[in-house]
Amino acid sequence: MSIIIDGNAIAEAIKQELFAEIAKCRSTPRFAIYQIGEEESSRTYAVSLEKSAQKLNIQCDYYQEDEDTEADILAASFTALAEDSEVHGLLLLRPLQNQTLEHILSMCIPPHKDIDCANPLSMGLLAVGKPILLPPTPAACIEILKRSGIKTAGKLTAVVGRSNVVGKPLALMLARKGEGDATVVICHSKTADLTEVLIRADIVIAAAGSPRLIKAKMIKPGAVVIDAGINWTEKGMTGDVDFAEVQQKASMITPVPGGLGPVTKMMLFKNLLQAYHLQEKK
């Protein structure tokens, strides 16, 4: 039976650290959430961030625009937020139905305010080893590994999924010299034999967006399993890992919910605090 990693406890520890750091700030860190349309899950996420921000003494401004608004008007209002010196972080709720507009707006976010790493330039800086801010979900994976005492250096680590939000940046972070130093394999829908790859891995991180894709037969006994999947089924939220099966074989595992999610939120606020300090130095 594996050790279940308590994401809520890790998030609470980070929250207390952030609270202490924010208390030392000369002014209140402030960020803006920008939503286009009325997608309910995006609004729910925004409300959750607003509540957490209030508890941390962070100012959160929420903007919701009609999806029928002309693109140039949206770009102008979004750019105004990006250029506002009193706004330290900017979060564009994604994905947008209009992918072209999403790209245009993402490119408007300065890397030093890009707390969700939506601007492709943020990914580019990570790729060359000079990131300003780190993508929250991959950063949460790394944070969980570190705080759970799991060493990644030299470990064969399989990342299942190649999205720009989780899979790709996570692979870069795990392989960073002097940081993760892991040997990383990226698996995806065209991987010929997923089980053959995963059964050799010391660490498996699932970020494919496929409910209960990872089965016990795919996991090496004693491997560490991090579930970054969020899938909604008739029975509620579930991850990419068949938790009931895999926990019998893994040495440590994160649940869904209560694993990566709460830590990801705290890493977003950690990015905001870093963004605040970067701008205060100017």
Image (tube, rainbow, N blue to C red):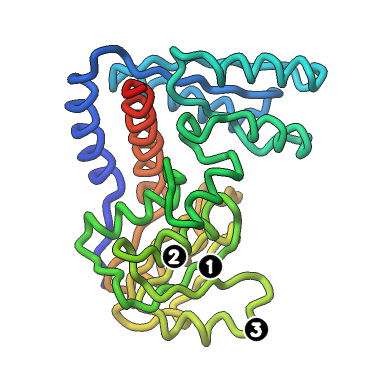
Q: Is residue 259 above or below residue 185?
A: above
Image quarter where the C terminus lies is top left
Image quarter where the N terminus lies is bottom left
Q: Report the residue marked by disc 2.
A: 205
Question: Mark 1 or mark 3, which is nearer the start of the sequence?
Answer: 1
State the residue in front, 68 or 121: 121
Q: Is residue 235 visible?
A: no
Q: Amino acid at mark 1?
A: Val
Q: Name the element at disc 1.
A: strand
Marks 2/1: CA distance? 6 Å
Q: Looking at the image, do the residues carrying marks 2 and 1 touch, with CB atoms under 8 Å apart?
A: yes
Marks 3/1: CA distance? 13 Å
Q: Report the residue marked by disc 3.
A: 192
Q: Along the horizontal axis of the image, is 273 left or right of 161?
A: left
Tally of numbered discs: 3
Q: Name the element at disc 2.
A: strand
Q: Report the residue marked by disc 1.
A: 160
Q: Amino acid at mark 3?
A: Ala
State the residue in front, 261 or 67: 67
Q: Is residue 223 above or below residue 66?
A: below
* Residue 122 pos. (x, y %): 53, 44
Q: Amino acid at mark 2?
A: Ile
Q: Residues within 10 Å of mark 2 (few under 14, many from 20)?
A: many
